[in-house]
């Protein structure tokens, strides 16, 4: 399974490999929960958006009953469009995800610590504030934060993110925010949040 044609390996049209050949997945009967499963399977965080990508090709047809011949044959041409089945285009968050939540927009916050090892880290509640939460909710396409509480969706799990985020609230992604080193997480509570938008239950 892979996402192709997007800005990163975590966005694009969903393709699956069957009998050695990659084919696009038709968007029949999909929903955001299914798209979120795909994101997590690809280790790409949470789903941000999923939509149908329509594909169509123009073609011409000569009417068989047309009596014209020679140069006048052009009068017999009719233009049509072939509509192909629509494929599923998915955008995943790539570097943040919410786990153990009751909806796609709630859960314990985890951050991908390094792109090379594909490792996810818990974020300490200490120092994680409303501006940080605003960036996360917006990055996930989930509106504004409505609840911000430590250990709301489970305890801290190793590994633990070693930096404290210092977002101003306008950044497009959490990893774009400034950060400072933190030696300990004295509260031992994981940052948990609920965003106001897109409340599809899991």
Image (cartoon, rainbow, N blue to C red):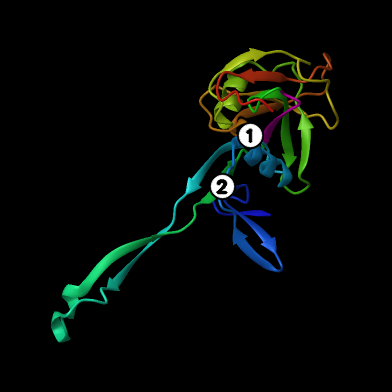
Quarter of the image holding residue 90?
top right
Q: Tell me the quadrant of the picture where the C terminus can be found.
A: top right
Residue toward you, 199 or 46: 199
For the magenta stretch, what is the residue range? Answer: 96-101
Measuring from the top left, give residue 127's x and y in whole percent. 70, 16
Q: Is residue 100 magenta?
A: yes
Give the labeled residue for mark 1.
175
Residue toward you, 68 or 161: 68
Mark 2 residue crowding within 10 angstroms, few (<14) / some (14–19) / many (20+)? few
Mark 1 residue crowding within 10 angstroms, few (<14) / some (14–19) / many (20+)? some
Q: Tell me the quadrant of the picture where the N terminus can be found.
A: bottom right
Measuring from the top left, give residue 76's x and y in whole percent. 20, 74
Give the numbered dot on residue 159. Answer: none
Q: Residue at x 23, y 76 (%)?
A: 65
Q: Is residue 13 magenta?
A: no
Give the labeled residue for mark 2.
28
Reply above or below: 127 against 116: above
Q: Is residue 106 left or right of residue 89?
A: right
- Indicate which label's residue lies in the foreground, 1 or 2: 2
Secondary structure type for disc 2: loop
């Amino acid at each position: 399974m892979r996402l192709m044609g997007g800005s990163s390996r975590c966005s694009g049209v969903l393709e699956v490999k069957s009998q050695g050949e990659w084919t696009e997945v038709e968007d029949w009967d999909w929903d955001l929960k299914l798209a979120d499963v795909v994101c997590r399977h690809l280790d790409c965080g949470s789903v941000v958006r999923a939509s149908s990508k329509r594909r169509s090709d123009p073609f011409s047809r000569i009417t068989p009953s047309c009596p014209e011949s020679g140069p006048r044959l052009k009068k017999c041409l009719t233009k049509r469009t072939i509509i192909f089945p629509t494929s599923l285009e998915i955008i995943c968050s790539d570097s943040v995800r919410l786990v153990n939540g009751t909806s796609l927009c709630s859960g314990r916050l985890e951050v991908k610590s390094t792109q090379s090892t594909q490792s996810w880290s818990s974020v300490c509640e200490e120092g994680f504030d409303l501006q940080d939460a605003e960036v996360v909710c917006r990055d996930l396409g989930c509106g504004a934060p409505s609840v911000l509480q430590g250990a709301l969706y489970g305890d801290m799990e190793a590994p633990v993110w070693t930096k404290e985020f210092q977002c101003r609230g306008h950044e497009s992604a959490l990893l774009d925010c400034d950060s400072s080193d933190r030696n300990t997480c004295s509260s031992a509570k994981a940052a948990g949040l609920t965003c106001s938008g897109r409340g599809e239950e899991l």
